[in-house]
Image (cartoon, rainbow, N blue to C red):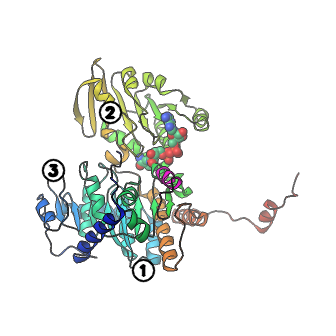
Amino acid sequence: MATATKKAPAKKAAKAVAKAAAQASAKPAAKNGAHKNGTQTNGVHTNGAAKSTGIPPKKGKGTFSEVAGKYCVRDISQAEEGRKLIQWAESRMPVLMHIRDKYKKSQPLKGLRLAGSLHVTKETAVLVETFAALGAEVSWSGCNPLSTNDPVAAALAKGGISIFAWYGNHEDFYWCIERTIDLKPNLTLDDGCDLINTVHEKYADYARKEVIGGTEETTTGVQRLRARAAAGKLYYPVYAVNDAITKWDFDNVYGTGQSTLDGILRATSVMFAGKKFVVAGHGHCGQGVAKRASGMGANIIITEVKATSAIKGVLEGYRVMSMDDAAKEGDIFCTATGVKDIIRKKHFLSMKDGAIVCNTGHYDAEINLKELEEVSKGKRTIRPNCEEYTLKNGNKIYVLAEGRLVNLAAAEGHPSEVMDMSFSNQLMCHLALAKAYKEGKKLPNQVLDIDPEQDEFIAETKLRTMGMSMDKLSKEQLAYINDYNAGT
Ligand SMILES: NC(=O)c1ccc[n+]([C@@H]2O[C@H](COP(=O)([O-])OP(=O)(O)OC[C@H]3O[C@@H](n4cnc5c(N)ncnc54)[C@H](O)[C@@H]3O)[C@@H](O)[C@H]2O)c1
């Protein structure tokens, strides 16, 4: 999914944002409660209502619950179901809830407007409502067409959050992002850089002058940001939340490991034991997927381009080979590289009849479905999130969740317990941005590293909430570590 945003002249862009903001401030989002009036049309497609406010119409078909300029979700009547899911997540996110409690009185985000583009899951909802509880005005969109939990989106909308997101949002992905920019944010939160890209490419002047800073959640997004910064085109500071130890080494490994298998199981219900399970990319996510699939009795094959990642696979007891070779052997394939065209035409042609193919990397670029179409004579949906392609050679190949991240599209994403740490990082980075701004400090327009103390605080708090204790270095041990003369 490429970001197809066209560059607009700075003046025109600033004008567009100003106009949108005027509309937004004329009809501010309701806070702390249900919207009392407006053009809410539960179950009715409401492009007409949007037209009268100057908001461009959506392309998506189907029914929506919409209050123009405030929210657009699939069905607001699912709010109660979503609220229970959010409460379930809250009870498993003690670190985030602890930070919420600590700051809710002092309202450190008061006066700030935060736009986010991140999978609308029950865990994300806990983060969004934490931002609101700490005083921010929040607007939100999903960051993948297939990762919004509709009841959760409905609950957020009903609770007064400005949210534009629904499952299956292929056509209006950027429409939703644009609606969150209507809020005129001065903080942005991304998962994959689609919001940051839109702000930078369409509203560059606004990005330079009005946005205090942002955060990025995932590996692919951080890579995009570093490329932008290297080109001198990053207009505000952005924390690389992904790179926190308490994010990258836990969420990507254990979260992706468990939830990817969950997604594959929900979409196929196959047995893993005895299967040849090919993991493309043995980085953080790939290690988690391989570890969990191996734990369920699958025989793991790793494909890699980096020798250090490959050798880690060998020492785990896996086989490592090229995708050309793995394609002939695998029963289940899962890509986790963040790179495009990992599985291509020649691989589909050499796969076994019945092979299952899925992806857990950020974008749907890893499996080349266009080339699969070219060598297929037909396809049908055989189960939810499972497409059966019949190749011209007669073989069948099963593609899960349109090649989009299978753990979010076919399951519920990562467990709350691990998102507790990732989202505590998100929150603390935004608190740091707000603090710097309120103290008049200008952070550099760079990709910012996470403060190691933040990592340590989150890990310690997590451990404590898990009922675990640790040892402390004694004075003597500390002196010993720092003694360059200490030997045998
Ligand atoms: N599904 C999810 O919920 C979820 C969660 C976190 C991250 N992600 C995404 O997953 C992807 C991987 O993230 P990560 O943190 O594991 O990154 P990582 O950098 O730790 O690992 C990626 C690995 O892929 C390997 N690789 C690159 N090109 C390859 C190729 N052509 N063939 C085989 N291997 C190749 C790299 O050498 C590296 O070892 C990213 O797109 C990230 O944004 C998804």
Query: Considering depth in this image, is 456 or 365 the residue closer to the camera?
Result: 365
Is tag 3's residue or tag 1's residue first in the polypeptide sequence?
3
Residue type (three-letter) at the residue carrying disc 2 = Leu
The picture quadrant where one finds residue 141 is bottom left
349 drawn magenta: no
Is tag 3's residue or tag 2's residue first in the polypeptide sequence?
3
Q: Residues within 10 Å of mark 2 (few under 14, many from 20)?
A: some
Q: Are marks 3 and 2 in contact (CB under 8 Å)?
A: no
Element under label 2?
A: helix
Label 2, on which residue?
A: 369
Task: Give the residue at x 26% y 69%.
Answer: 20
- State the separation of the CA atoms marked 2 and 1: 48 Å
Q: Which residues are magenta?
A: 222-236
Query: Considering depth in this image, is 468 or 384 the residue closer to the camera?
Result: 384
Callout in the foreground (2, 1): 2
From this view, report whether residue 316 is shown above or below residue 145.
Answer: above
Element under label 1?
A: loop
Label 3, on which residue?
A: 61
